[in-house]
């Protein structure tokens, strides 16, 4: 025994093993204790309830959901609703954040002051209050159903939401949309190849430039293959509410608006910090080479600033996603809200909180992973 | 939201760390602490809501007072903990409150898997719908496609889904964490309908600027026996809470109220003598003072008095006794004999 203990390597392993054992032991004890206590108080345990019929309705859902579906499906509907808010919200928040951050650094006095005022005000008001405010604005100021405003032909706005026409055959159209996205990505890829070739060979390939646009035939082709569906579903007033078309509910709109406005202020500061961190010499060098201000920002400053900006930007993206759980306060059925209802109906608080934690954790880890991959591309390449 | 999470985490921690049960401990703990903690609503006029001076008033509050009198002979030894629908069960499970007197419906799943025990209902209610008079709706059957505001964590969410499904109507629920947000959304026109227990709707309506502009539709779509609840596994405390409800009902049945109770002191009726502790029995068997019922009735009153004072025809709620009348008068209130 003593012999092993004197070997530094083995000793370290023994200690590590003991620590691991103790941690596992503590967790095991806590788990066992919880189980026994819950049993003594006659509180149900386990995840079996996920297979039961949920029984409650959900106000808005991206997939078909009925109250006789299971709790599992109800929670899934909630996760989709959360993702809808997170994805749309984050795109807008990063876009506006960068824009406002740039205005804050602009030479224009008015623009600079307005951005500064915006950032300082919005950052310092609690998010929940802002959400209540936007929700009140939507429900109080917009007209009732019968007095709905028709913004553009067939696009209606009232205190139940914004209604606009959508194609009847949503399934085919989602394929067409995917084809469109593929062709946009493909177009940029082909252009990149072309430009590279031009630089390498010193010749112009203007013929290919036009040829590359042909990739946009892909979505059109998909449309034909799917039988060229063209029927449109228009919103119209029937009974209490508008039916048909697609709807952005006031809850969704207030939530996205509140989150975007709040998070943009932080993103703007991150952008400003990122750009300020780039040495003045870079600007001067660019201008000495005769590169215009906007071009030097685009091709010299921003790529370098992104390296500094990405880590804090990632936390803001995660923050927006997690802050979307405030949805329950203004009645948007995000997955926390739905899991809360589940918790109340089944009484299984610990399991439900566990589900909430696991889902947020997976979302956050996934986001961080994607953002880290992205950040790697902007790292300085040492030569 | 945050507070709910905190409570739930607290509860988890509590289950993680605690290793003994509550059996027989509640009464002892209350006596040692010197007051009773009573879980009540966040403000429902007529049932539990603070008045302009911050004093809690209502039917559920009077029940807490009756319990306090039974335990301490004094109605002021109660600490009220205001809870939303989400928080109430965890608060009781974790021992934060001793009794939940908060217009809570007794259901099978709550009584079993949630780890609660419901005592006897102190208010027989049912879920109803409220609409604006101007909408012209006369029956709940006309509500297909309507947006309905409601509160999260209540039985109303399920009842409403069942009712709409059974009648093949389309439902668009808008579910809020707090009751007030839901009511506000309804008033501002975000929803066509507000749903809650009929008594709760009457209570909310009494707070509106123009209560006469709103009507409660005649359909009652569910059974909502609102009963005080205690933790599962402490029979002694369960008995005390249950028999306090019965004492209030039995007093009304015997015609004893807070004003005439002194005239019953010399009553020869053996039922009255036993009930008021003149002939011993009612205190000893339950572990309380022999005069506990006498004290309750003289300080808080009988069921009828509590009802009329808080939700009856003289109050803004103007509720009729209906099901909440004695069995002898066509209601459901029926107390087992005090023997």
Image (tube, grey):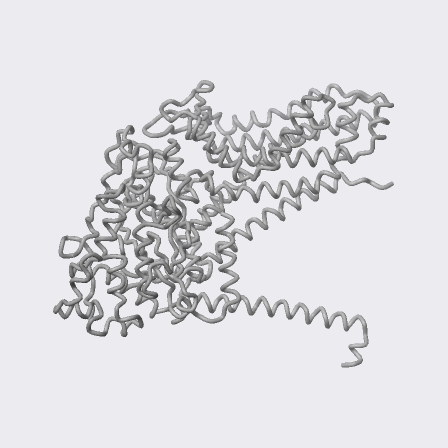
Give how far across and how far down residue B295 sits, in percent. Answer: 27, 63
Residue found 49% across the figure and 25% down from its top? A228
Res B167 quadrant in image: top left
Q: Is residue B170 above or below residue B89?
A: above
Res B288 quadrant in image: bottom left
Task: Count all numbered tags in the image, as a single digit.
Answer: 0
* Foreground pick, A321 / A48: A321
Give how far across and how far down residue B71 sits, in percent. Answer: 33, 66
* Foreground pick, A5 / B153: B153
Q: Is residue A326 visible?
A: yes
* Foreground pick, A196 / A2: A2
A99 on left or right of A36? right
Q: Is residue A169 visible?
A: no
Give how far across and how far down residue A88 sits, in percent. Answer: 56, 35
Quadrant into which the N terminus of chain A falls: bottom right
Q: Please, which residue is most extreme toward the left here?
A: B268
Res B250 quadrant in image: bottom left
Residue found 56% across the figure and 36% down from its top? A259
Quadrant into which the C terminus of chain A falls: top right
Residue found 73% across the figure and 28% down from its top? A105
Give how far across and how far down residue B174 sits, in percent. Answer: 40, 39
* Foreground pick, A104 / A379: A104
B124 on left or right of A48? left
């Amino acid at each position: 025994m003593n012999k092993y203990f004197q070997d530094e390597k083995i000793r370290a392993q023994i200690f590590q093993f003991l620590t691991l054992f103790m941690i596992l032991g503590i967790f095991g004890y806590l788990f066992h204790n919880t189980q026994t206590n819950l049993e003594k108080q006659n509180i149900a345990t386990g995840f079996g309830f996920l297979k039961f019929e949920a029984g409650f309705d959900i106000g808005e859902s991206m997939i078909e959901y009925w109250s006789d579906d299971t709790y599992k499906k109800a929670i899934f509907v909630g996760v989709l609703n959360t993702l809808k808010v997170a994805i749309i919200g984050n795109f807008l928040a990063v876009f506006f954040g960068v824009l406002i951050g740039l205005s804050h650094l602009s030479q224009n006095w008015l623009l600079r002051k307005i951005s500064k005022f915006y950032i300082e005000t919005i950052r310092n008001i609690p998010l929940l209050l802002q959400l209540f405010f936007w929700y009140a604005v939507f429900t109080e100021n917009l007209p009732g159903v019968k007095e709905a405003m028709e913004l553009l032909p067939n696009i209606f706005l009232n205190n139940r939401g914004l209604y606009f026409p959508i194609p009847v055959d949503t399934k085919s159209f989602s394929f067409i949309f995917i084809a469109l996205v593929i062709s946009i990505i493909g177009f940029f890829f082909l252009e990149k190849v072309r430009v590279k070739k031009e630089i390498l060979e010193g010749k112009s390939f203007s013929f290919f430039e036009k040829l590359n646009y042909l990739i946009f035939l892909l979505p059109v082709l998909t449309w034909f293959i799917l039988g060229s569906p063209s029927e449109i579903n228009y919103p119209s007033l029937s009974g209490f509410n508008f039916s048909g078309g697609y709807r952005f509910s006031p809850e969704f709109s207030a939530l996205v608006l509140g989150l975007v406005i709040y998070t943009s202020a932080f993103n703007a500061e991150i952008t400003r910090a990122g750009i300020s961190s780039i040495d003045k010499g870079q600007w001067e060098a660019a201008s000495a080479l005769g590169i215009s201000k906007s071009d030097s920002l685009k091709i010299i400053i921003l790529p370098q600033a992104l390296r500094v900006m990405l880590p804090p930007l990632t936390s803001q993206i995660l923050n927006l996603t997690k802050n979307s759980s405030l949805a329950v306060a203004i009645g948007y059925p995000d997955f926390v809200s739905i899991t809360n209802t589940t918790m109340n109906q089944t009484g299984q608080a610990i399991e439900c909180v566990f589900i909430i934690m696991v889902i947020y954790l997976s979302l956050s880890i996934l986001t961080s992973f994607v953002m880290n991959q992205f950040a790697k591309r902007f790292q300085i390449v040492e030569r | 939201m945050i507070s709910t999470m905190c409570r739930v985490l607290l509860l988890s921690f509590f289950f993680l760390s605690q290793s003994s049960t509550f059996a027989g401990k509640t009464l002892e703990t209350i006596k040692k602490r010197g007051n009773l903690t009573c879980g009540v609503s966040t403000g429902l006029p007529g049932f539990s809501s603070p008045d302009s001076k911050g004093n809690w008033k209502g039917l559920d509050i009077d029940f807490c007072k009756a319990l306090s009198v039974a335990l301490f002979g004094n109605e002021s030894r109660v600490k009220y903990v205001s809870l939303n629908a989400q928080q109430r069960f965890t608060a009781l499970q974790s021992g934060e409150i001793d009794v939940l007197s908060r217009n809570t419906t007794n259901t099978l799943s709550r009584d079993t898997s949630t780890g609660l025990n419901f005592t006897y209902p102190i208010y027989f209610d049912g879920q109803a719908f409220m609409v604006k008079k101007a909408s012209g709706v006369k029956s709940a059957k006309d509500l297909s496609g309507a947006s309905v505001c409601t509160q999260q964590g209540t039985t109303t969410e399920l009842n409403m889904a069942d009712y709409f499904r059974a009648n093949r109507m389309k439902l668009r629920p808008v579910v809020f964490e707090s009751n007030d947000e839901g009511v506000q959304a309804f008033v501002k026109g975000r929803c066509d309908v507000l749903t809650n227990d009929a008594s709760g709707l009457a209570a909310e309506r009494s707070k509106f600027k123009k209560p006469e502009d709103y009507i409660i539709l005649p359909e009652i779509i569910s059974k909502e026996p609102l009963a005080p609840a205690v933790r599962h596994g402490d029979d002694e405390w369960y008995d005390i809470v249950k028999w306090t409800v019965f004492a209030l009902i039995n007093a009304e049945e015997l015609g004893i109220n807070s004003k005439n109770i002194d005239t019953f002191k010399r009553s020869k009726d053996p039922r009255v003598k036993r009930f008021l502790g003149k002939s011993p029995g009612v205190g000893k068997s339950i572990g309380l003072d022999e005069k506990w019922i006498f004290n309750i009735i003289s300080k808080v009153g009988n069921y009828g008095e509590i009802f009329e004072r808080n939700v009856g025809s003289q109050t803004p709620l103007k509720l009729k006794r209906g099901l909440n009348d004695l069995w002898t008068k066509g209601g459901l209130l029926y107390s087992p004999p005090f023997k």
